[in-house]
Amino acid sequence: MKTLKALAATALLALGMNAQAAQHSHTEHDHSTAEGMQMHQQLVQKEAQEMLADGEVRKVDKSAGKITIKHGPLPNLGMGAMTMVFRAADSTMLDQLKAGDRIRFHADTINGALTLMRYEQHD
């Protein structure tokens, strides 16, 4: 009988702790508040910033919409440092770039082609 009472008490305690933990978890990760939305946006921005690779523009071919970049590792593409040609996601991106420019950039594979998605000029 004591064992049954102990088991019942343990079960009730566990249920109460799970309910309290669930309530705490909900409030910790509630993105509906302004503070929660701001924290989420900062996290997304940080992740996006970490996805930028260092590179040096070697050649810009505006007529073909392509750019050659000597770059560091591209973890999201599983590539090491090398020099390669990227298609520009938007040809107007190439208007501001010239050989020798140092950039931080994000590239992805779009329709089977390595594509420069965005960049920031870097000193």
Image (spheres, rainbow, N blue to C red):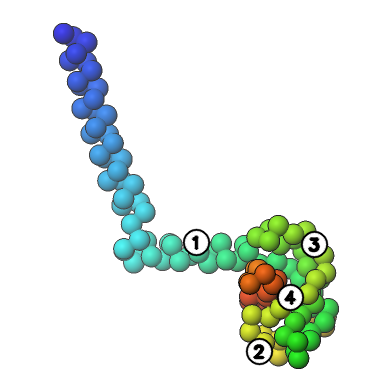
Q: CA distance from mark 4 to mark 1?
A: 28 Å
Please identify, in this view, whether the residue under mark 4 or under mark 1 is nearer the observer: 4
Would you call the spot at circle 4 few (<14 residues within 10 Å), some (14-19), or many (20 or more)?
Answer: many
- Three-letter amino acid code at disc 1? Leu
- Residue name at image x 70 percent, y 71 percent: 114
Residue located farthest toward the front when viewing the structure as drawn: 111
In this view, 70 is above or below 88: above
What residue appears at the point 63 percent right and 72 percent down from the top-left corner?
111
Residue 86 circle label: 4
Given contact means CB atoms under 8 Å apart, are the residues at marks 3 and 1 in contact? no
> Badge 1, how many Cα within 10 Å: few under 14, some, many 20+?
few
Residue at the spot of label 2: 92
List x then y, in percent, for residue 5.
17, 15
Instruction: Say which mark, if any, is on residue 81.
Output: 3
Question: In what quadrant of the picture does the N terminus appear?
Answer: top left
Q: Of residues 34 and 85, which is closer to you in this image?
A: 85
**Earlier residue among tags 1 and 2:** 1
Q: Position of residue 21 (x, y in %)?
A: 31, 40
Q: Is residue 58 left or right of residue 86?
A: right
Query: Residue at position x 76%, y 91% from top?
Result: 63
Amino acid, disc 2: Thr
Q: Is residue 86 visible?
A: yes
Element at badge 1? helix
- C-alpha span from label 1 to label 2: 29 Å
Locate residue 30, reporting x and y percent: 33, 57
Residues at badges 3 and 2 in contact (C-beta under 8 Å)? no
Residue 73: assigned label: none
Reading the image, the residue beneath label 1 is 43
| CA distance separating discs 4 and 3 | 14 Å
- Say whether disc 4 or disc 2 marks the residue closer to the N-terminus: 4
Q: Which residue type carries mark 4?
A: Phe
Q: Position of residue 14 (x, y in %)?
A: 27, 29
